[in-house]
Image (cartoon, grey):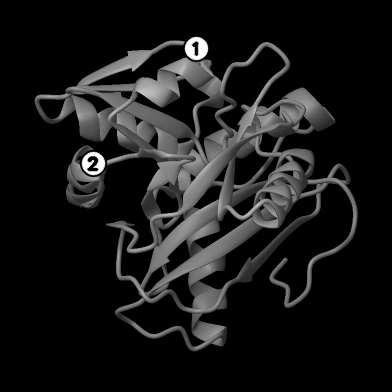
Amino acid sequence: MLCGRFSEGAYIFQNVHTFGGEARHAAAHIALLCTAARRLFGLDVRISADELRRRIARLAEACRTPSRVSVRAIVRLYPTGTMEIACDEPSIYAGYVLRSLRPDALFVRMAPPLPSLPTSAAEHTRLMADALAHARGAHTAIMTDGEGYAVSESAQPLFAVSGYTVMTPPAAAAEESVERRLVREAARGTDLTFAERRITIDDLAAADEIFTADHRGITSVASIGSKHYMPIIAERIAAQIEEITF
């Protein structure tokens, strides 16, 4: 179903990067939706990657999306099995990029349930965490759990860079988001080392860079408190992601 306004209720979702109306990495997005649907709703999703591409292309055409512009297609799947797809406004960027916005961040102790799966609960927890960060004078939140480990969300995985090593918390292969996989492949396609480990607040304080990945590309954190971070590796990762996509 293509929609102008989403239904209410719980859902799982994917944010799909489209360029010129063409959905990128549709097969990987569908695979993650299938995994989450089986685990959470007991559903078998019966839609192929080709069908998702066709639906998104029809929606882009109906919305008269410019041909050389990136747009997010938001795909939601509800416990009833209903799937809805809607498009955002056109982006100021074309393709995956290192975003010009470099937010100041702070730590918020607030972990969403099932952070490795793309659920409405995780999405709304992110909105609440960012609202708390804004109220405290920062632009975004880095969420931590009760043990002091950084939370890496499915829709916005977190990465820390120390030297030439890109670190991120572990994720099961079936639950790895498209964005996390792209960063992993981008790092391994260069002279960078990709490492999976639980990341503490102290690890982030000692890091050279911190960045997140989402449907737009890479967002590099500018600072946490008095600690400032560089965007050098983040820029390399963003460029490599766009390269490997083609």
Residue 166 coordinates in the image, percent (x, y): 29, 24
* In the rendered image, the vertical position of residue 86 relative to residue 4, given as above or below: above
Residue with the mark numbered 2: 237
In the depicted structure, whether residue 117 falls above or below residue 87? above
Asked if one can make out residue 227 in the rendered structure from this viewpoint, the answer is yes
Query: Residue 59 in the image: x percent, y percent?
Result: 57, 76
Q: Amino acid at mark 1?
A: Arg
Quarter assignment of residue 114: top right
Rendered location of residue 207, percent (x, y)? 33, 25
Out of 44 and 217, give the one closest to the viewer: 217
Q: Please, what secondary structure does the residue beneath circle 2 have? A: helix
Q: Residue at x 86, y 46 (%)?
A: 10
**Disc sitting over residue 143 in the figure:** none
Residue 211's place in the image compared with 207, above or below, is below
Q: Farthest residue toward the left? A: 191
Residue designated by label 1: 198
